[in-house]
């Protein structure tokens, strides 16, 4: 299978993350197949508080258009590592080509009904990169807006207006915020 054949495929997995096959990305989301994914969050410490680089998905994405999400989320291509996939997609979506030190801090599994009759059923690898600063140039086909959010701002918005975020965002954010291996200050 070459890269052009695999670009629209997702890796199907069992509940332990073991590969069971491959499926067309759209078909897997319509059926609700459990598949491999990653959620990358770029974080920076600003003294006694933390900022998270979030993106607002392009309005015409195949699901969750116009909603805020973590820095980058997608699916590894067949036989592509999670870290390689994260580097590839953050370059494609946000033009970030800087050498990021990526850490996979864990996995979560979720199933959410979305718009456009899609079901997001993912075995999601949580990937974090801590930076001092970073430059980006968003791809308008993928992203409509990018900005730094403080942890307090995210928590307040999740409480008062959670529908501005993707269905999976709160789980990803909470997992990262609660991870004690990161050097970010805790509330």
Image (tube, helix red, strand yellow):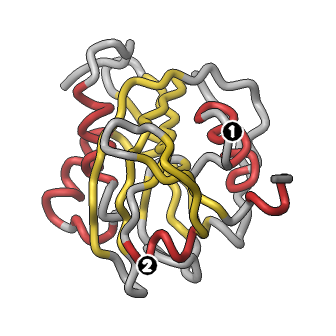
Numbered label attached to residue 15: none
Q: Where is residue 175 in the image (x, y as percent from the top left)?
A: 27, 35
Element type at mark 2 = helix
Q: Residue furthest front?
A: 20
* Along the viewing direction, whichever of 22 and 128 lies nearer the viewer: 22
Q: Where is residue 31 in the image (x, y as percent from the top left)?
A: 40, 75
Q: Residue at point 49% right, 53% down?
A: 12
The C terminus lies in which quarter of the figure? top left
Q: Where is residue 92 in the image (x, y as percent from the top left)?
A: 75, 53
Numbered label attached to residue 30: 2
Horizontal placement of 70 versus 175: left or right?
A: right
Which one is earlier in the sequence, the residue at label 1 or at label 2?
Answer: 2
Horizontal placement of 130 versus 92: left or right?
A: left
Q: Residue at point 62% right, 40% down?
A: 86
* Relative to 1, residue 130 above or below: above
Q: Which residue lies furthest to the left in this view?
A: 159
Residue that numbered label 1 is attached to = 80
10 Å crowding of disc 1: few (<14), some (14-19), many (20+): few
Horizontal placement of 39 versus 72: left or right?
A: left
Element type at mark 1 = loop
Q: Residue at point 42% right, 70% down?
A: 67
* Relative to 121, residue 104 above or below: above
Q: In which quarter of the image is residue 68?
A: bottom left
* Relative to 121, residue 95 above or below: above
Q: Position of residue 3 (x, y in %)?
A: 83, 53
Q: How many numbered markers are drawn?
A: 2
Structural distance between the alpha carbons of marks 1 and 2: 23 Å
Q: Residue at point 66% right, 25% down?
A: 100
Q: Which residue lies furthest to the bottom in this view?
A: 116
């Amino acid at each position: 299978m070459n890269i052009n054949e695999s670009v629209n495929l997702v890796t199907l997995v069992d509940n332990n993350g073991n590969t069971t096959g491959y499926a067309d990305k759209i078909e897997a989301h319509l059926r609700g197949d459990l598949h491999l994914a990653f959620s990358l969050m770029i974080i920076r410490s600003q003294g006694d508080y933390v900022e998270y680089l979030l993106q607002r998905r392009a309005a015409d994405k195949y699901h969750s258009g116009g909603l805020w999400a973590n820095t980058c989320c997608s699916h590894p291509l067949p036989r592509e590592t999670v870290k390689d996939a994260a580097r590839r997609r953050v370059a494609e979506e946000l033009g970030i080509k800087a050498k990021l030190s990526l850490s996979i801090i864990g996995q979560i599994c979720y199933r959410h009904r979305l718009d456009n009759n899609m079901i997001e059923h993912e075995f999601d690898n949580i990937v974090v990169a801590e930076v001092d600063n970073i430059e980006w140039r968003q791809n308008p086909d993928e992203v409509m807006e990018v900005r730094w959010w403080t942890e307090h701002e995210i928590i307040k918005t999740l409480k008062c207006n959670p529908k501005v975020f993707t269905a999976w965002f709160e789980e990803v954010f909470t997992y990262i915020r609660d991870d004690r291996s990161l050097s970010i200050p805790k509330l």
